[in-house]
Image: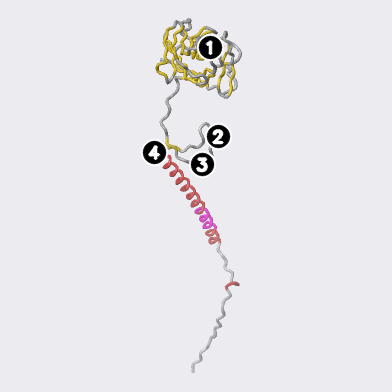
Amino acid sequence: MRLVRVIRVSLRPIDEENVEMEKSPESEIYDLKYARYKRRRLMFLLLLGAATLVFLCAAVNFTFFAAGIALGHVWPLSPPGSTAVPHMIASYHVNQIAPPPPVQNDFLYRQSFDGRTLPDWHTFSDGWDVQNGVYYGTNTRADVRSAAVYGRGYQWADYHLEADVTATGTVAPSSAGLLFRAQENGHSGQCLLGTRATGQRQLELLTPEGQLVSTSFHFVTGEAYRLRATAVGPTLTCAIIGYPDARLTATTTVQRGTVGLQNQGITGAFDNLLVKVGD
């Protein structure tokens, strides 16, 4: 008879929480290297994303800028004349580029009389005053030609002088107008709205040598007229802009001199004076 040994094996569930797994040194080094790799990969992806965003913004801005040049538009960063340095554009608008104005390098002088004082002007009698953007000669003595001249133009030779001139009174005789090629008080050319002792109103051109030419022009008291005096070489002209028939010519030997204003017998009002190079 054969004997068989029966071996009983008891199967019990293993408590996984109570089982401790020992890691080898090689496994710990691997885990550390893998963690470093993940951090480096995350940093690389972040840098790549930031660089891509910067590139896209630059590409968009360049595209708008190139399109603006091609279409003739500009995007202003600050208002004209502003000294502020713009650091951020909250909004923009498109302005059509207009043809540039002509270079005004032929102007010798401009004066709108908007300031309170005129430090570069010389007066040869009292009664000159700037009020509300107008230069007034208020000395109304009939025996005094009240003059004011620009003190920096004594070496000017050929030029055109213009200004708005208003004769504000009806006294006879009287006058108000422009001075040109002036070297001293009482020695200059004159382009005037004048009233003779008879009451006749006229346009007058007086040369620096004292020669007088005139033409009848019934100007209206209190109304501004744009007078233009021209001195080019020996030729002088006196005209009223907008009135082709109101034009006088004469000659002179005085080749240089500054510009100015004058009134006599009445208050003269003057504005928007400019001097351009003559040709």
The residue segment tinted magenta is: 32-41
Count of residue discs: 4
Mark 4 or mark 1, earlier in chain:
4
User: What mark, if any, has residue 40 been given in the picture?
Assistant: none
Callout 2 amino acid: Ala
Seen at 39% across and 38% down, the residue is 71
Which residue carries the number 2 mark? 84
**Helix, strand, or loop for circle 4?**
helix
In this rendering, the label closer to the viewer, 1 or 2: 1
Quarter of image, res 104? top left
Which residue position is annotated with label 3? 89
Q: Which of marks 3 and 4 is nearer the N terminus?
A: 4
Q: Earlier in the sequence, mark 3 or mark 2?
A: 2
User: Which three-letter amino acid code belongs to the residue tagged 1?
Assistant: Ala
Q: How far apart are marks 3 and 4 (CA)?
A: 21 Å
Return the residue nearer the eye: 233 or 12.
233
Quarter of image, res 251? top left
- Asked if one can make out residue 37 in the rendered structure from this viewpoint, the answer is yes
Q: Is residue 58 left or right of residue 131?
A: left
Residue under pointer 4: 71
